[in-house]
Each structure stands twice: as C-alpha cells, then as structure tokens.
Image: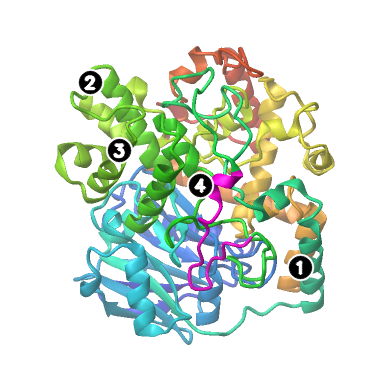
Amino acid sequence: MPFIVDLTSGNVTKEYRSQDKGHYGGTILGLRLMAERTPAGLDAFDPEALLYVAAGMLGGTAAPGLAKAVFLAKSPLTGVAGEAHALGPFAAGMRAAGAKALAVVGRAARLSYLLVEGGEVTIHDASDLRGLGTAATTDALRARHGGGARVAAIGPAGESLVRYASVVTDYAYAAGRYGLGAVFGAKNLKAVVCVGDAPAEVADPETIAALTAYYRDSLATNPLAALQAGSPGFAGWADDPIAPGYASVRNFSVPGAPGLRVPSARDYDGRAVSVRGSVTGSATGSATGSCPGCPNNCLKVYGDRSGGLGQEAFLSLGWNLGIDDLDVILAANARCNDLGLDVVSLGGTLAFAMECAAHGLLPGGPAFGDAAALPGLIENVATRSGALGDLLAEGSARAARKVGRGAEAYAMTVKNAELPCFDPRPQPGIGLGYALAPGGPRYDALEHDLDFDPVAGLAYSFPEAARVGAGVAPAHDLDEERGTRSARLLRLWSGLDALNLCVFASTPTRPLTIDRLTELVAAVLGEPFTLADLLAAGQARLDGMRAYALRECGGRLDEALPARLHDEPVSEGPHEGAVLGRAAFEEARAAFYAELGWHPGKRS
C-alpha cells in the first residue's frame, strides 16, 4: 500500500501490506514501518528517520467525518511518536492522485517537493520556494501543477527546524502538533503536492448518501454540530464568559477569575474569508465547505487566508498570554499558519518565557499582556532570530533546562510537549490523557469530563458513552473509576484516530454515533465493521505508540504533570477547590493502566 520514497537516492518503490490486518492504512501501519525500518535511539532529524503521510483506507472519502490525513514521525519535540492530523481536502487529494500512504526516508540534496500524480510519486526541485510561507508555497505549486492541486507545505519554521514546526495543508488546515514540519525541514522536503481527480471508491454509495443527509439534518439538532457550523464557529470563543479554572490564564498561573475579555459573536462579523474554494466563511456548511463530503463547515478562516482558526488558537495565543485583543490573536494565528508554527506549543513556550521574565529569570524577556510584542516574538521564533528566538524555538522544556535556576517549574509540559490550554484541574480525565497518552498531551485525545457531568453535561451523549463503559460521573471526581472510564474513552477516540475518522464529527457527543460510524466504515470498505473492531483498532494504536515510546526512551516514560496542577487548586467560581490530588491521581493512573492492559514503565 505505501509508496516508499528515498529522498537521498531518489528511488521510489511500493510496498504491499495487504496481508497485514487491522491497520486501515493509517497510524498503526505507520508505527509498524517506523519500528521495522529505524533503529532505536535514532535522532528525529537523522536522514534515515521515517516520515509517514497517509489518508489510509478511509481518509479522503467524500462522506461526513472522513477528511483526515495523518502525519507521523519520531517527534523532535517529544522523542516519541509524533502524530498530527490535518482536516480539509488534502486526504481527498492524496486519494485522487492515486496514493493512500507515503513513507519517506533520506534527505534530499537540495530543497525538494514530492509530486503525487496518476499513481506515481516523483521528486522535484523546490530551491525557489525556500523561505516562503505556506500560503505563497501553495500558490507557487498550484501555479505549476494546476489550481486543483492539494498541497501540504512547511514554512520558515520547518526550514529552521523549530521543534514544534507544523505542516499546513491547503492554506489553512494544520497538522500542528509535535514538530512534523521540522521533520520535513530536516529532510529538505518543502511540500507534498497531489494532483488528480479520481474519487475514493466506496462499496455502498447509497448508504453514504443517506448518512450524509442524516448528518446535514443533524446540524439543526445536535448542539455541538450546530455550534461548529454556525458563526463564529467551533473555535470562536464568543459571548459566554469562561468559568475560572476552565482554561489556562497566564501559563496556568491564575487559577481564579481570568479578568480577560471574551469577544462577542459580532466581533467576528465581516472577518470570514474564502480560500479558493478550500474554505468558506459561510455558516451553512455548503458543498464548497472545508472538508469534502461533509455538510458541516467547522474550521473558519478569519482575516487572512492562512488563518484557519482551530479551537486551541484563541486560548493558546490569547488568555494563556494574558491577551484578549481579538485583532491581535487572529493576526497571530494567521501568521503562525503561514510560518508553519504549532499555536499550542508556541503559546505554551511564550507563556513560559513570560513567567520566567516576571520572576527575573529572563531579563528583558516578554511580559504577560504585551500584545504589541507578540508579532515580533512569533517571527523571531520561526526564524530562530536572536538568542531569545533560538532558545524558544527549542520549546519550553528544553529552554527551561538551559535557563536553569528553577525555570523548570514554569514549563507546563509532558514529554517535553506543551499542554493544551484546557485546564485539567476541574476535568481530571483530561489530565490523565495529558499525562498517559503515549504520544504526548492532546486536548482531543478523549472527550471532556464536563460533557458527562450529571448536572452540567450533555445528556444526549450519556447512552453513547455508556456503550463503551464510560458512565456518568461528576466532572471533578478523581478516583479509580475516573481512571477506568478515561482509559475507555481514550481507546474509543484512539480508534477514530487509527481509521482517520474525525473526532469532531463522532461519538459520543457529535452526530456520528457508534451505530452510524460502524455503518459508515462498512459502507466504505464493503465488509462488516463493529464497535469491537473500532475499539480493537484504538487499542492497537495505543499499544503501538506506547511500545515505540518505551523503545525510544529506554523504558523511562515522562508521565508527570507539572507540579502546579497538583498543588494549586482553582480558587473561585464553579470549579473552586478543583485540584489533581497526588494520591488520587496515582489511584486513577493504576486503574487507567489496568484497563488498557499496560504495566507501568519507569517514570522520569
């Protein structure tokens, strides 16, 4: 199934893995190739490190929830398997060009790009694209290969080997986390271009059409789907003030009232833009929307064509930095997309630097709330300009070790990766996911605890969660049951990741319920598919990622949350007193391990 591309020699071969079962052409297969083809301890920037890009057997199909492409490699940030997913049309572009997966090794002698067309992969010179942002790169490659070409590109941050550089697909859809853009840069790979118009075949088109109609109807009845489709969109963070403790404020250092403005939906009016058919600013989810085949239009673009606004951007670049100026935040998000920077790690690293400066550890460093300084900081990090830019391009954990003098206390990381800005103190299942997910902390690794709170939760989702053994429980509870149910939810969403199914369309809180998901997969593949199959894929992905992490770390895993989350309770509001007690967290951790059949590794 995958094309094996050696950038050093220029050789391209195809490897058939149809005898392997249960990998669905996605992350599981990529992990197998990484384990088979690379030795333990290989540096993430070594030419022989393997980069895997895949639509798989389901991604890119014209149906709801099937737009994801996976990018996978050893992360230069975490040292374990770094997995990032891109929504939008790129997965469909891979399938249309005749490739379900690419495995890339070696390093090109000069900056290059891969062209996938007509079921063939070729390597081309990209020297003229050096230094360009992701939007200009995409423009140039579409001018060369046609306006319908789908492009995954890096910007200056990837070329500069910023350890949390991202890959951005089709202007606005980032594969953001864990530094996959820097792996591109280390291989002298500027982009992957896909050209073709062959649709992904499905076994049962009538069922796909019926599921699409059902999903379209559900936009009026499912509250989260309606929120995603509406204006300002899923990532808008408008109108309702956030409860103290729900999200990070000033590097998780203010566990009380944020004191920051929440914009209204009107503040977003007139800002939505269209990116050449890839993204619409409408709230209708039309056929020209962002993800082919999906009636929803979740990811809006505001103010700049490269500014696809993911849910984490406003939190990471806004309140986490003590900034509430919407213009500044939207411009910063757009610039990060164009430079190819993960907004989560950038925001966490800048917040670390701001807190260090406040404590006198970075004299002359940036200050919380200094919106005017943010654009320059972003540019300096992306290009490693100056001592501070070069330091912060390493990420907050490595920067803390260089700064010393207690700076480690302000690096809010697990596995050297910055935490997303959803505070786990009032939602301990999120904290378990941050600490124990083998690839590193992700906010979308499992559904949030508050959604299953008996009072504040989304009651319509309770039966779906119960089907995987995750019953209703007060969000703040941290005990053995929390560990078990969090592991079960992690396994479920791991199954979605393994098949390149969109978590923002799927069970337990979105329209694609378990029954609809299994019907969807069966309709695409033409073979029976059950909940047990989905959970088995989720377990296999988690086991593969954990085995790779144990191999790369010599059995010593970093699964420790920052001490602040254990020691400083939320001080006011509806979550007052919420904290991750150490003894209760260890009890929940043991239950989490037991549910997944894992034995604790040595912990750093």
Q: Secondary structure at mark 3?
A: helix
Task: Specify whether residue 84 is painted magenta.
Answer: no
Say few, some or many: other residues with alpha carbon within 10 Å of mark 4 (under 14 / 14 to 19 / 20 or more).
many
Q: Residue under label 4, please give it.
A: 545
| Residue located farthest toward the bottom when viewing the structure as drawn | 118
Tell me which segment is drawn in magenta.
Answer: 265-282
Q: Residue under label 1, please give it.
A: 212
**Distance from label 4 to label 2 (Cα)?**
36 Å
Residue found 47% across the figure and 19% down from its top: 254
Q: Secondary structure at mark 1?
A: helix
Say few, some or many: other residues with alpha carbon within 10 Å of mark 2 (under 14 / 14 to 19 / 20 or more).
some
In this rendered view, identify the residue nearer to me: 393 or 556: 393
Counting residues from the N terminus, which is met first, the one under dot 2 or under dot 3?
Answer: 2
Say few, some or many: other residues with alpha carbon within 10 Å of mark 3 (under 14 / 14 to 19 / 20 or more).
few
Which kind of residue does numbered mark 3 sit on?
Ala
For discs 3 and 4, the disc positioned in front in the rendered view:
3
